Amino acid sequence: MARLHAEKRVLLADVAGDSIRAMSGSMVAYQGKVEFKHAGMGGGGGFRAALKQKVAGESLTLMECTGQGRVHLAYQAQDVTVIGIENDTLTVESEHILAVTPGLTLDVQFAGLRGMTSGQGLATTKVSGTGQLGIVSDGPLIGLEVVPGQPLVVDPDAYVAGLGQLQMSLVSGVTWRSLVGDGSGEPFSLRFEGHGRVYVQPAER
Amino acid sequence: MIGGIDSPTYDASTLPADDNVNPYAFSIALAGEWFVSKGAMIAYYGQVEFAGVSQYASRASWVAARFSSPLYVQDWVVATGQGKVLVADRGYDINSYDLDEGNLTIKQTNLLGFQTSLELKQSIVPGFVTLLGTGKFLASSNGPVIFVEPPFRADPESLLGWADCPSPSQHYDHNWMAQSFMSGLQGAFGRESGEERQYDFTGAGTILLQSSEATRVDAAMLRTIESQTNLLDNQSAGALGQRLVARAQRQ
């Protein structure tokens, strides 16, 4: 049974005759007998997922690590968090997925036309099932509660993950458009309503 | 069931008021206005509006008196309203400072926000701005901030700012200067080790350093230097242009 656990900024993945999927190129070392194989686009979600990913401009390529042993995974010395999921769904910004155990399925969520016009960071990956997920973040994660009547607005470049009954909408008010000026400002922001929790990182991608 | 995330969780009322959330993020308790660097906001609760400085100045005439830096107008916004605004910068350490009838000069790319009771002016040193008055401001640093007192020589990349002391002069390494005289070379293109130029501080005050030489590209730096080329006559400007082209081709 594949297990993940975080040790500082490295994710240790133990495989015992089974496999995990990990971010391509994230292996820094391994012990035992492990084989690495390109798992294709869309995180194994099939052709439909691959197509959706193309359309949404989402960049998630995974590799399959199979065998007996321990794989050390890391990405740019970023903080690593291991999340346990039991019959639940978590939404994660795809660039932050470092590894998933077999019990979880990944599905690229298509943010629609609006997602395309506003560039990267608006199409996310839905992770559901039972298993473990390892994610990376530039700095420690900050959890922000969303309750009815208390909406939260997040910069898309700082958004990492969300859980619960959240409705996400894009805010592109006049006040935001005025920030475009030099191209460095973010014209869109994400507005969360409902009941749940959003995780952000103290950095912008 | 989702478990295993041991990161602290906040809501609008439990977020700190004008204090750090962790070393890398700061929570502004907004009740009125703040000047915020464009792109520094990562999340907010409440009724908050962000407007470009020039756009906001047309509604509120005091802005022109407080934000006295045409060079940086397009890099800043005014946040208005009520709520909690989270500010961060590339995962760098964020520190807040309180000025009390004081003045502090800081690298523009490291300044993330300041209260509207403070006045911003461009420093004579390119890339730096001076804050005057009483109020709070936020600055980022790559690694913890080191405070030192003059006399002191600082590397321009790691220098964050200085308070209460005269502006620095530039210091060049003795050996480097001696070699320049001997070889009769003019100008410094292509002969730099990266350490021969330092900022020299004298007098009484405090100097702020970051423990790294990582800096962000300052979009305004180009505009600053370009405006300074007005000091050159046409022939000199042409010569400068040729040297810059030669440098760009070498790289």
Image: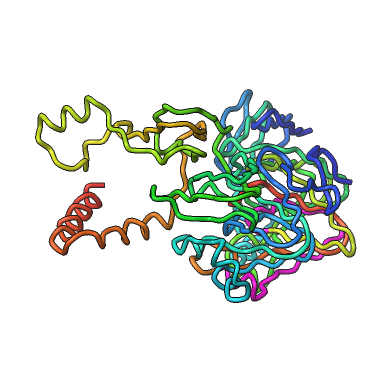
Quadrant including the N terminus of chain A: top right
Query: As displayed, is residue B6 above or below residue A39?
Result: above
Does B215 sit left or right of A5 as displayed? left
Stretch of the chain drawn in magenta: A155-179
Q: Is residue A167 magenta?
A: yes
**Of B155 and B246, the residue lying toward us:** B155
Q: What residue sits 39% from the left and 50% below the top?
A: B124
Q: Nearer the viewer, residue B28 or A155?
A: B28
In the image, residue B92 lies in the stretch drawn in magenta:
no
**Which quadrant holds residue A142?**
top right
Q: Left or right: B65 with respect to B154?
A: right
Residue A20 location in percent, x, y?
A: 70, 39
Q: Residue at x 83, y 54 (%)?
A: B12
Q: Is residue A22 visible?
A: no
Q: How is the image coloured?
A: rainbow
Residue closer to the observer: B87 or B111: B111
Residue at position x 47%, y 31% from top?
Answer: B204
